[in-house]
Amino acid sequence: MSSKSNASEKLSPITLNIYRILVLGGFTAFLCGALTIPFYYETQTLWYKVGIDNTLLRTAQLAGMLALALLFVQITLSVQSMFLKMLFGGARILRWHQRNGVLIAFLALSHVFLVLAPEGMANLPIGKKHWPEMVGALLFALVTLTVVGSYFRQKLNLNYKTWKAIHQPLGYLVIALVTVHVLYVSESFEQNVPKISLLIAFFGIVLQVVIVKLLVWRSKKRKT
């Protein structure tokens, strides 16, 4: 019997449900907290936008914030810690990971479109001065590549080992790039609370990945 099954059997159904509620509640609070940032820490750009342009830009900010939050969730799902496996099962976490990836790609596309719509294609932010926006463009390309590659892996004749060797580093690169992009492109994150919160989330994710990888490595080493 697996260690996951042994751990699950030690917990009563009530305890498992309590943990599930706490995890899902924390996830919901995290998303809601992210979505409040554009309202509590409003960017000056919105002050000069009226009517439909204001609405489009506000919606773009919300789509971007939701994509940001879900990217952090995506990394948590991808590492599949034993705790999450115990609560929800590996198959369910994998399904969430796949669907979340599609949602992130859709939100990223929406964010790009809604940001550019009020300005028009003639005012694309290109050049050294607009490097944070160009990081965002690279980020969008990588997110799209990652999601498309995942769904067409077999048609591309990529075996699982090769695909994982590409997919996983891309995921880590995306989370690093999105942190840089948001910190330097959004006026909201010039404020201490959003900035510190984002950095805590980023380094928390890094720490989580390192811990899970070390535990997996140690487990494999014991078996050899």
Image: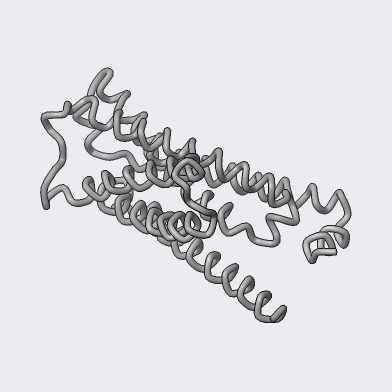
Residue 15 position in % (x across, y down): 83, 53
- The residue lying furthest to the front in this view is 157
Picture quadrant of residue 4: bottom right
Q: Is residue 224 visible?
A: yes
Please name the residue shown 40% across and 35% down the image. 62
Q: Is residue 138 left or right of residue 143?
A: left
Please name the residue shown 38% across and 39% down the image. 64
- The residue lying furthest to the top in this view is 51
Q: Is residue 218 above or below residue 86?
A: below
Please name the residue shown 68% across and 55% down the image. 84
Q: Is residue 33 visible?
A: no
The residue lying toward the viewer, choosing from 5 and 186, is 5
Q: Is residue 139 left or right of residue 172?
A: left
How many numbered dots are placed on residues in this image?
A: 0
Report the coloring of the rendering. Answer: one colour
Residue 205 position in % (x across, y down): 50, 61
Picture quadrant of residue 203: bottom left
The residue lying toward the viewer, choosing from 14 and 92, is 92
Please name the residue shown 87% across and 50% down the image. 13
Residue 145 position in % (x across, y down): 38, 44
The residue lying toward the viewer, choosing from 145 and 207, is 145
The residue lying toward the viewer, choosing from 65 and 128, is 128
Quadrant where the C terminus sits is: bottom right
Quadrant where the N terminus sits is: bottom right
Residue 219 position in % (x across, y down): 68, 75
Q: Is residue 67 above or below residue 2?
A: above
